[in-house]
């Protein structure tokens, strides 16, 4: 199972203050749209997402089909296949991807400690 690029998605109160804080830690804007209150930032191979008002808690995020530079991978496990494998392993899904669809989709799960994990395929 290839989960793809990993990042931490942070629910922030003030996107501009958070952007400035992480810039002081050496992160640079990599993607997103600050006017829409979301921004992807990188420091080397470390990736974080800043999201204001989009979700309640911080999340671990995996992007099947992408590497840490948001470049398409030649080979990856489709999100629907990952979803089915997790179901077979008894993992409860909080939300599900439409198994009849193709291309972009997402689903969420929760680890035993209540941490939300988003699997978000963009291609």
Image (tube, grey):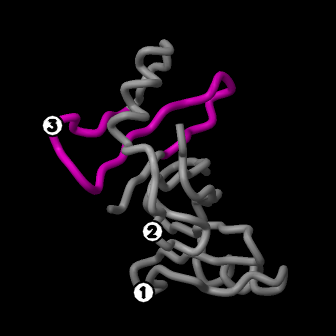
Image spot of residue 116 (x, y percent): 56, 39
Find numbered disc 1 in the image and state the secondary structure of the residue it sits on: helix
Per the image, label 3 sits on a secondary structure element best described as loop
Q: Nearer the viewer, mark 3 or mark 2?
A: 2
- Give the x, y percent position of residue 3: 54, 46
Which of labels 3 and 1 is toward the front? Answer: 3
* Closer to viewer: mark 1 or mark 2: 2
Tell me what residue is drawn at x 43 percent, y 34 percent. Answer: 82
Q: Residue at x 54, y 53 (%)?
A: 4
Residue at image position (43%, 60%) is 54
Task: Check disc 3 and report the residue beneath it.
Answer: 100
Which residue corresponds to mark 1? Answer: 35
Q: Which segment is the magenta one?
A: 95-118
Q: Quadrant of residue 79?
A: top left
Q: Can you say which quadrant of the picture contains the C terminus?
A: bottom left
Q: Is residue 47 magenta?
A: no
Q: Earlier in the sequence, mark 3 or mark 1?
A: 1
Judging depth in this view, the residue of 72 and 117 nearest the camera is 72
């Amino acid at each position: 199972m290839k989960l793809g690029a990993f990042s931490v998605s942070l629910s922030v109160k003030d996107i501009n203050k958070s952007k400035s804080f992480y810039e002081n830690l050496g992160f640079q804007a990599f993607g997103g749209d600050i006017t829409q209150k979301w921004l992807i930032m990188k420091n080397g191979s470390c990736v974080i997402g800043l999201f204001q008002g989009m979700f309640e808690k911080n999340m671990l995020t995996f992007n099947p089909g992408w590497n840490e530079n948001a470049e398409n991978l030649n080979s990856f496990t489709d999100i629907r296949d990952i979803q089915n494998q997790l179901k077979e392993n008894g993992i409860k899904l909080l939300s599900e991807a439409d198994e009849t669809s193709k291309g972009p989709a997402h689903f969420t799960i929760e680890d035993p400690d209540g941490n939300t994990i988003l699997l978000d395929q963009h291609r």
